[in-house]
């Protein structure tokens, strides 16, 4: 398994895995599959080139199998914080340690990012497997956003979590 930071050259594979994630685990993401599917690959490439964001991927034989993004807040008063977003591991990699190793790469990068002090994320409160993963990585729950998402008439609460670096 190869773990590395993604670049614009990875946009097609990233977009393909992202769309899979939005189809197979729709409740885990606030992005709608149909909206994402209409965005061109060039928009994905632009996102991967954003200097305030870094996306890491796990590759096996050239195939992207897991990904996660760190998006640093840009305000003068908030630039010490970053959000962990778009975390997904293909079903075949779950339980193998791939996501944990990928997260280690993200955390190593975060700890070296000058001035970054805190990571934040929101996770579906009805997803105990994901919550345990983040807790094992050192995140602490800090609250709940009720009705954070509304999908097909159903509401999804999100658990807010934080990790101080």
Image: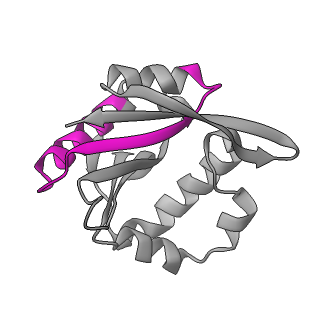
Q: Quadrant of residue 120?
A: top left
Residue 85 can be seen in this image:
yes
Q: What kind of colouring is applied to the model shown? A: one colour
Q: Quadrant of the N terminus?
A: top left
Q: From which residue to which does the magenta span run?
A: 100-128
Residue at position x 18%, y 48% in the image:
109
Q: Quadrant of residue 115?
A: bottom left
98 to 152, vertically: above or below: above
Q: Nearer the viewer, residue 42 or 148?
A: 148
Instruction: Locate residue 144, reporting x and y percent.
Output: 57, 32
Q: Quadrant of the C terminus?
A: top left
Instruction: Locate residue 106, reporting x and y percent.
Output: 26, 44
Q: Nearer the viewer, residue 1 or 146?
A: 146
Residue at position x 32%, y 52% in the image:
82
Instruction: Locate residue 99, reporting x and y percent.
Output: 38, 33
Instruction: Locate residue 30, reporting x and y percent.
Output: 63, 51
Residue 68 can be seen in this image:
no
Q: Quadrant of residue 141?
A: top left
113 to 66, vertically: above or below: below
111 to the left or right of 131:
left
95 to 27, vertically: above or below: above
Total numbered circles: 0
107 to the left or right of 60:
left
Residue lying at the far front of the rendered structure: 77
83 to the left or right of 131:
left
Residue at position x 54%, y 62% in the image:
15
């Amino acid at each position: 398994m190869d773990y590395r930071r993604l670049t614009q050259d990875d946009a097609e594979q990233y977009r393909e895995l992202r769309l899979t994630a939005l189809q197979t685990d729709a409740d885990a993401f606030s992005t709608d599959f149909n909206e994402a599917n209409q965005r061109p690959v060039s928009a994905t490439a632009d996102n991967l080139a954003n200097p305030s964001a870094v996306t890491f991927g796990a590759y096996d034989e050239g195939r992207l199998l897991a990904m996660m993004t760190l998006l640093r807040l840009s305000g003068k008063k908030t630039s010490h914080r970053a959000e962990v977003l778009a975390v997904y591991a293909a079903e075949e990699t779950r339980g193998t340690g791939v996501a944990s190793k990928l997260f280690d790469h993200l955390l190593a990068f975060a700890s070296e990012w000058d001035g970054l002090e805190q990571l934040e994320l929101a996770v579906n409160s009805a997803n105990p497997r994901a919550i345990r993963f983040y807790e094992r990585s050192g995140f602490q729950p800090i609250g709940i956003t009720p009705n954070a998402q509304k999908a097909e008439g159903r509401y999804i609460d999100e658990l807010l979590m934080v990790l101080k670096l």
